[in-house]
Image (spheres, rainbow, N blue to C red):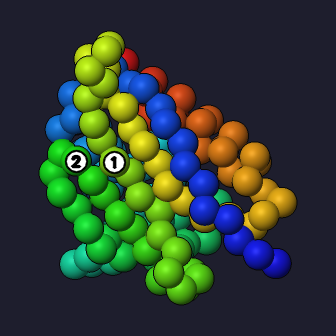
Amino acid sequence: MARTKFSLEYQIRSSPSILYSFLTTPSGLTQWFCESCDINEDIYTFGWDGSTEDAQLVEGIDPEKVVYVWVDGEKDEYFSFEIAKSEISNDTVLYLTDFTEDDEVEDQKQLWLSQFEQLTKRIGA
């Protein structure tokens, strides 16, 4: 089945540096993204419901951008977060790019939005 690249934009009241730590550290990631997280050099092992998946951190620009590639994922696919400040509201804006099956785009968007809501609560925004 074909896969589709999709993007989301989410406003969050947080400083970019605090948000960046929630996207790159085990203590931050386990509060909203996964149940467990271990890092060995640039490989992150994320755990959910007793299973794990490995992702490589291929780009990390503090506090602007994070790009992960699933180790066992499709070639040329990644998931990334970009952090920017809104000129209008002065809120921090989190941009997500990810890939999924064509028929699962809306479900994946809803999953990410749910996770971003959890992230917002954990940050205290």
Is residue 104 in sight in this rendering?
Answer: yes
Is residue 115 in sight in this rendering?
Answer: no
Residue picked out by circle 2: 64
Q: Secondary structure at mark 2?
A: loop
What residue is drawn where x is 42% and y is 26%?
11
Residue picked out by circle 1: 82
Image quarter of the N terminus: bottom right
Q: Secondary structure at mark 1?
A: strand
Q: Is residue 15 above or below residue 4?
A: above
Q: Quadrant of residue 91?
A: top left
Residue 115 percent location from the top left of the image:
55, 39
Q: Residues within 10 Å of mark 2 (few under 14, many from 20)?
A: some
What residue is drawn where x is 41% and y is 58%?
80
What residue is drawn where x is 49% and y is 55%?
97
Q: Nearer the viewer, residue 68 or 54?
A: 68
**Which residue appears farthest toward the top when viewing the image?**
89
Q: Nearer the viewer, residue 103 or 40?
A: 103
